[in-house]
Amino acid sequence: TINTTWSELLESVTRELVDTGVYDEINDLEDRLRTAINMYCEGSGYFAYTELSDGTYTIRKVNDTTLESMPSEVVIPNGYKGKKVTTIGDSAFDASSCDSPIVRVYIPRTIHAIAVYAFYSCLELEEVVFEGSGLLRILQRAFEGCTKLSKITLPSTVTVIGMSAFSSCSGITTIKFPSGLQSIGETAFEACNLTGKIVIPASVTSIGSSAF
């Protein structure tokens, strides 16, 4: 499926463009790949959407049966019915009552918020790839209990990390905070295996209790 070969497609296209020197076409081809991804996702039944008041869409919770049937690599759509997808909704991929096979998830720059419990207890999740900057908020318990999660680079645009957002993500050993970060919620990184020096940006005005 397209989902399972997204990383290979990007690698192949990028390599071809580098080899031919056609650098200015990378974004155009990525957009076309994204359009194909969105069309596939609309027909796959993997995702359910709710329209927001601003006309954009959020991905709402998928049922356990659908979640268990997903591929190991999941690409979050950046659009639906010609409108942007801007939020991964509450408990969208919550795996607390089922077995999620998701190992890697790709999140587009259109996503501004990852809501509460969005990827809660996705035990196989190892990597979150943000495709560009745009994300502002990672809310409460969004990735809590993702014990294998070890590869994540926060976009430069993130301002809020909510309560227990990465709690019990024992695979996380290092984290680099974006320079515009404003708040880190209580127990945000509790029970992670952070080592070495943690640098808190000067922009941070609030750090909750037991954040680390």
Image (spheres, rainbow, N blue to C red):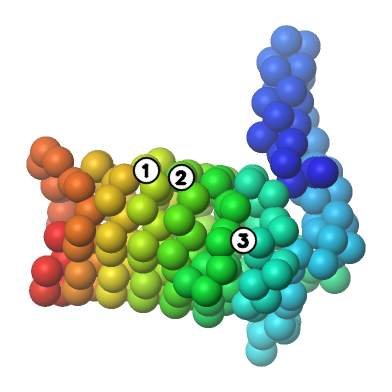
Is the residue 151 above or below the residue 12 in the image?
Answer: below
Q: Which corner quadrant holds the C terminus?
A: bottom left
Spatial CA span between label 2 and label 3 = 22 Å
Spatial CA span between label 3 and label 1 = 23 Å
Question: Within 10 angstroms of label 1, few (less than 14), some, or many (20 or more) residues?
Answer: some
Tell me the quarter of the picture where residue 158 sits.
bottom left
Q: Residue at x 32, y 61 (%)?
A: 166
The reply, left or right, for residue 190 in relation to residue 135 is left
Are the residues flagged by discs 2 and 1 in contact, CB closer than 8 Å?
yes
Residue 57 visible (yes or no): no
Residue 8 visible (yes or no): yes
Residue annotated with mark 1: 150
Are the residues flagged by discs 2 and 3 in contact, CB closer than 8 Å?
no
Q: Residue at x 77, y 11 (%)?
A: 20
Question: Within 10 angstroms of label 2, few (less than 14), some, or many (20 or more) residues?
Answer: many
Tell me the quarter of the picture where residue 136 sits.
bottom left
Amino acid type shown at disc 2: Glu
Q: Find residue 109 and report its horizontal and vertical position in percent.
A: 58, 55
Residue annotated with mark 2: 126
Is the residue 177 above or below the residue 59 in the image?
Answer: above
Question: Which circle, 2 or 3, is nearer the viewer?
Answer: 2
Q: Nearer the viewer, residue 76 or 96?
A: 96
Tell me the quarter of the picture where residue 180 sits.
bottom left
Q: Which corner quadrant holds the N terminus?
A: top right
Q: Find residue 198 and report its horizontal and vertical position in percent.
A: 14, 47
Residue annotated with mark 3: 110
Amino acid type shown at disc 3: Thr
Q: Please report whichever mark, 3 or 1, sits nearer to the chain's N-terminal start.
A: 3
Q: Find residue 95 and report its horizontal and vertical position in percent.
A: 52, 68
